[in-house]
Image: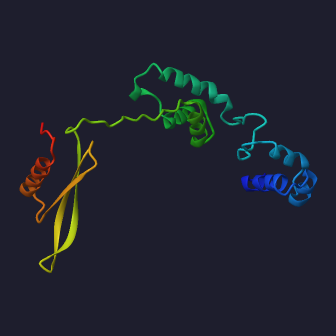
Amino acid sequence: MIKMAQIEHIKKMYFLEELSIREISKITGHHRDTIAKYINVENPEPPRYKLTKPKGHPVLGPFIPIIDEILKTDQTRHRKQRHTGRRIFERLRDEYGFTGGYNTVADYLRKIRPKLKEAFVPLQFDLGQHAEVDWMEAWFFLNGIETKAYLFVMKQGVRADIMSEPIRLRNRKPSLMVTVNVLNSWAGFQMK
């Protein structure tokens, strides 16, 4: 199978070095038809193996209508009452004498069950409605002595500026005082 780097090399030999298809075939060892195919393609995609016919299900084949029926009846049931892949496998094995493995059933279910689309919720807030807060531990020199302090860092969602204030102890009273100080220092921040 030809790789993308080989396709680029073939195109370089043909267009820049102006070699013939026959000469390129001798150099690379690929057939002339293959070289001609890739020279004429403007944006080649990586070559992929194409199945001539869909893969069969030698073990699962007779049980596919049963699985489809189970899934059809599940559509009318409550979400929590529907069959899982494991439960479908167990029913096929116990009730119908299925001799295949769980992965065979799971692979088939993965192909036929609808895929869930990703959902995103945009986070947009007006001024004063949202802020991100974090704490970090910082070491610095205070009067020549290395001292540990906690740094309160706050970023308002709409604005780009970041406010921070150090405190020595991280307990409730200093934390609340720092929060109020930072909020008061921002012009336009409305407490709700």
Q: Is residue 24 above or below residue 97?
A: below
Q: Is residue 5 left or right of residue 179?
A: right
Q: Quadrant of residue 139?
A: bottom left
Q: Based on the displayed image, in which of its 4 quarters is residue 100 positioned?
A: top right
Which residue sits at x=81%, y=42%?
40
Residue furthest toward the left?
173
Identify the residue at image location x=10%, y=58%: 171
Most distant residue in the right direction: 22
31 versus 96 height, above or below: below
Tell which residue pokes out farthest to the bottom in this image: 144
Q: Nearer the viewer, residue 64 or 21?
A: 21
Horizontal side of 35 relative to 189 (left or right) equals right
Q: Position of residue 101 (x, y in %)?
A: 60, 42
| Left or right of residue 160: residue 104 | right
Q: How many marks?
A: 0
Q: How is the image coloured?
A: rainbow
* Quadrant (top left, top right, bottom left, bottom right) of the C terminus: top left
Q: Position of residue 103 (x, y in %)?
A: 58, 42
Which residue corresponds to the image point at 16% horizontal and 41% vertical from the top-left? Answer: 188
Closer-to-camera residue (146/50): 146
Query: Which residue is nearer to you in this view: 80 or 133?
Result: 133
Q: What percent of the width, then of the height, locates residue 57?
A: 69, 35
Q: Position of residue 8 (x, y in %)?
A: 75, 53
In this picture, residue 82 sits left or right of residue 161: right
